[in-house]
Image: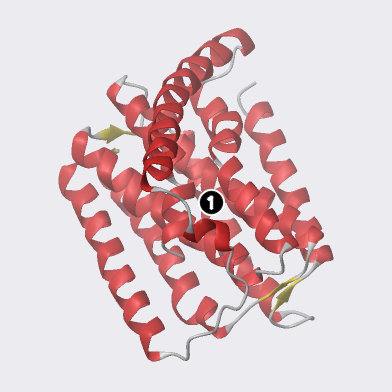
């Protein structure tokens, strides 16, 4: 919910910031909204098909309500003036800080699970190697974000669709690859709490941190009305559907059939995103 989510949201942050600075607000907004949809429909769907996920009570007591609340708040912020400005971005970021404080404080009061399998190689990693990997990763993210935004614009022109369609589909899938990798690896290693926590946390980070920080640097305008009339409702629907999926049999588990439902729903969203423009 914290470290992994922040790390896997880094591509969304750099892509949205780069797009906003380039004057491509549709890509900045569509990337985050599309990534949140992909995290649940694509990533959670695939992860659940690989290995059924057990759901603990903190999911519907704290994490899911925060994700839904901040999604609804984003909708009202955007619809009120068709722009996300500095004050609204700051409010989103402050809400994230408050949420993380509550989350960490709550976790400290709970029983700590003893981790037995520690990779000894991690303890021996030199500071030089850590810094080197950070520099390489940072450079890859920076140039990758520039190329992804440029490629998205060119692809939109060549396919004859809007930047908004490319951003909520192709760009969003591209920036969701870290979530997919982290969740699939966690599921294969039976770290199921990390799988779901990473996705819920990433969705919260995408709105509160990615859009919050981007809006504080460069206001994000709603250039394409379909972002507010269609895409953001898809995002809220994918978030909302998790609750009935958690409580219908098997309760507190998202298994393979439920994962398949999410995956099919995501395929329908992608199909409608492209055909809705023609």
Q: Position of residue 99 (x, y in %)?
A: 32, 70
Tag 1's secondary structure? helix
Q: Quadrant of the C terminus?
A: top right
As drawn, is 153 to the left or to the right of 83?
right
As drawn, is 47 to the left or to the right of 15?
right
Q: Is residue 131 above or below residue 104?
A: above
As drawn, is 139 to the left or to the right of 120?
left
In which image quadrant can residue 86 be found? top left
Residue sitting farthest toward the right = 257
Q: Position of residue 109 (x, y in %)?
A: 37, 90
Nearer to the camera, 66 or 14: 14
Q: Position of residue 222 (x, y in %)?
A: 35, 33
Residue 154 seen in this snapshot = yes
Q: Is residue 265 above or below residue 173?
A: below
Looking at the picture, the colour scheme in use is secondary structure
Circle 1 residues within 10 Å: few <14, some 14–19, many ≥20: many
Residue at 45% across, 47% down: 9
Q: Is residue 229 above or below residue 194?
A: above
As drawn, is 181 to the left or to the right of 98?
right
Nearer to the camera, 47 or 194: 194
Residue sitting farthest toward the left = 87
Q: Position of residue 85 (x, y in %)?
A: 20, 41
Nearer to the camera, 116 or 23: 116
In which image quadrant can residue 32 be found? top left
Which residue position is annotated with label 1?
A: 235
Residue at 60% across, 57% down: 238
* Numbered marks: total: 1
Residue 84 seen in this snapshot = no
């Amino acid at each position: 919910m914290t470290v992994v989510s922040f790390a896997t949201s880094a591509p969304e942050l750099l892509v949205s910031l780069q797009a906003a600075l380039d004057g491509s607000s549709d890509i900045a907004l569509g990337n985050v909204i599309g990534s949140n949809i992909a995290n649940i429909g694509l990533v959670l769907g695939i992860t659940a098909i690989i290995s059924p996920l057990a759901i603990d009570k903190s999911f519907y007591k704290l994490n899911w309500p925060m994700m839904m609340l901040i999604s609804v708040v984003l909708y009202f912020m955007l619809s009120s003036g068709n722009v996300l400005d500095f004050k609204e971005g700051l409010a989103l970021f402050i809400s994230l800080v408050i949420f993380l404080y509550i989350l960490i404080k709550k976790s400290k009061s709970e029983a700590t699970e003893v981790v037995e399998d520690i990779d000894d190689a991690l303890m021996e990693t030199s500071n030089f190697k850590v810094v080197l990997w950070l520099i390489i990763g940072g450079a890859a993210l920076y140039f990758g974000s520039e190329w992804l935004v440029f490629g998205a614009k060119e692809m939109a022109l060549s396919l004859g669709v809007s930047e908004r369609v490319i951003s909520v589909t192709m760009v969003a899938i591209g920036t969701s690859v870290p979530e997919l990798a982290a969740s699939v690896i966690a599921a294969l290693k039976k770290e199921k709490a990390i799988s779901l926590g990473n996705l819920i946390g990433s969705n919260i980070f995408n709105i509160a941190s990615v859009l919050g920080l981007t809006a504080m640097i460069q206001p994000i305008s709603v250039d394409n009305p379909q972002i507010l009339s269609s895409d953001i409702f898809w995002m809220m629907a994918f978030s909302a559907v998790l609750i009935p999926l958690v409580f219908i049999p098997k309760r507190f588990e998202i298994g393979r059939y439920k994962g398949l439902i999410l995956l099919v729903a995501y395929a329908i969203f992608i199909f409608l995103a492209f055909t809705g423009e023609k």
